[in-house]
Image (spheres, coloured by chain):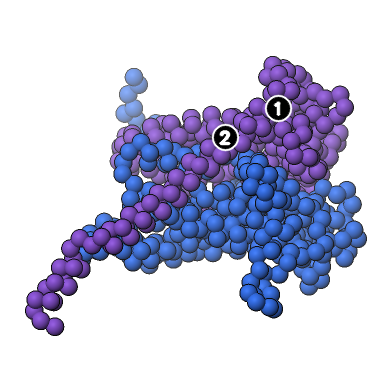
Amino acid sequence: MKRMNDLEEIRIIIGLHKRWDLIFMITGIIALMIAVLTFMALFAHMLIDGMPRLSWDFFTSFPSRRPESAGILSAWVGTTLVMLVTAVAAVPLGIGSGVYLEEYAAKNLLTEIIEINVTNLAGVPSIIYGLLALGLFVYQLGFGQSILAAGLALALLILPVVIVATREAIRSIPVSIREGAYALGATKWQTVSDHLLPYSSAGILTGIIIGLARAIGETAPIITIGALTFIAFLPPSPVKSEFPYISFEWLTAPFTVMPIQMFNWVSRPEEAFQLNAAAAGLVLVVMTLAMNGLAIYLRYRMRKNIKW
Amino acid sequence: MTEESRNKTHAGKLGYSFRRHMHERLIEALLLLSAMLSIAIMLAIIVMLVKESFVFFQHVSVWEFITDTQWTPLFDDAHYGIMPLVSGTVVSSLIALLVALPLGTIIAIYLSEFAPFTVREMAKPFLELLGGVPTVVYGYFALLFVTPMLQIIFPELPGFNLLSAGLVMGIMIIPYVSSMTEDAMRAVPMNLREGSYAMGATRFQTAIRVVMPAAFSGIAAAYILGISRAVGETMVVAIAAGMQPNLTWNPMEPAATITAYIVQVSLGDLPHGSIGYQTIFAAGLTLLLITLVFNIIGHILRKRYREIY
């Protein structure tokens, strides 16, 4: 081995190695910039094309054969109703499984199978959930190509997200809180419902918001169950003027959602429809970004405030 | 209230209460039921796909399904070879991974080993936002922005092609790869880095020779997740790559992936129980098997990585 007594020589070697550091720093920043710039290009392109179409009429008109008068009324109403079903189904089931796995489950084979399974479900492509919903909800259970079938399909899709968020939020609560509750004679469920769930609510909420933001943007599973791409009417109103005032007819109504409306417009050759697609995409991106942003903000606040 | 009765009520509250016990058991059973639902979902997926595929494979032999080079199930001259769909899936996924894995890894190394605190705190949420953009929007971007840009460089590039779909899909997958890779690298204990620095290594040398090998299985799991995302991605390829099943390995051509085919068929009005209806389940089963293999490999790798330290 060469002896490096000469200080000058060592300096040169260190300098060479430091240069690699610098080169990598620059590569890293460039890589990050590629991601940032792509997003900027995407957003700018949609903004330029779609902005002129965004008017009050765009939100209050049905889709139409004439691109200038087409709007997204049936799409955003459909999205809202589907999300309602998704949240009602996924939230209790997700929190329930999360609580069970974290607080109740014994370390045994069954628990391990459930855990592996939740990880696996998170990796199943979304279109497979669409096929499941098509076979099970649409035909086997006879829900038809309805808001109910779509909402449940998306609920299954985001279930792993809610479960994982619930588990992580509950896990971060120190054992001393549980011990304190048990020491005062609380039962397991009292400990969970009076202490663990309230303290982890911000974390769970973050997971729910991220899950719903993902569900809003999902197209594939809803296309698979056979949602229509051209809908010029609204589902029956959930509120009625006569007794019992609430109706569930809308659950079985045909529908369309925002991403499908956008997909429909993108796939048309006429350029005027593609401007509509840009406008719909803009609404969609702003909606999902706002939800994701809210979730990130909540997590940030949470990390800052809670010091156990 | 006498002393005696007060003691009795206390005993009643603190001692064994049948009602309270049953209430607890009932809640535990309900929670277990919701946890078991995830298994039921997985079983339902498998049963549904296998059931419909079984009927399909009574019409079409498995051998024909694997070896036929044409996929034209809805034509009069029907061919049922899955290869054209698999080739489209493989080509678009490969392009996506060629973008996502190097860029994702570089971003992860940069954020975990080089970036100042503020850059990291700003970049992480931004990447998360990037991962939250709906896939149909990425499809729009690939078709109406990336393809025209590429056509400036390659004038003969068709409007629908695997290249732009793959490139955009790659950008879309970067956040998944980079955030998991960064988590794995951050989990490497500080004293390994300190040891390396003490030996006179630079940051770059430490990152490549110490931190990355130590985080190997975590990084590999992140890559596998990226692969399984790319294979299962639907809307970008359905919009930007066209929907013609085409046995090609050339990214400059239009082609269909397994997912794009399912979308295409679902857009039409296929009668329940027809052979066309069954083909989407056979295609879905193929897709599920591919992603399941990757998920299992990823799971094994993650488990090993947890046990290292």
Query: Which residue: 79% across, 40% down?
Result: B270
Pick whichever of labels 2 and 1 is earlier in the sequence.
2
Nearer the observer, B234 or B177:
B234
- The chain holding disc 1 is B
Is residue A146 visible from the viewing direction of this image? yes
Label 1, on which residue?
A: B56
Q: Can you tell which quarter of the image residue B58 is in?
A: top right
Query: Which residue: 9% across, 76% down?
Result: B4
Q: Is residue A164 above or below residue A200?
A: above
Dots 2 and 1: beta carbons under 8 Å?
A: no
Label total for image: 2
- Farthest residue to the bottom: give it: B1
Residue A286 locus on image (x, y percent): 66, 62
Residue A236 locus on image (x, y percent): 73, 67
Query: Which quarter of the figure is the C terminus of chain B placed in?
Result: top left
Residue A242: mark: none
Disc 2 packing (10 Å; few <14; some 14–19; many ≥20): some
Nearer the observer, A135 or A20:
A135
Residue B48 locus on image (x, y percent): 61, 36
Label 2, on which residue?
A: B46
Left of B195 or right of it: where is A20? right
Q: Which chain is purple?
A: B
- Farthest residue to the left: give it: B3
Q: Can you tell which quarter of the image residue A284 is in?
A: bottom right
Disc 1 packing (10 Å; few <14; some 14–19; many ≥20): many
The kind of secondary structure element at disc 1 is: helix
The kind of secondary structure element at disc 2 is: helix
Q: Is residue A192 above or below residue A221?
A: below
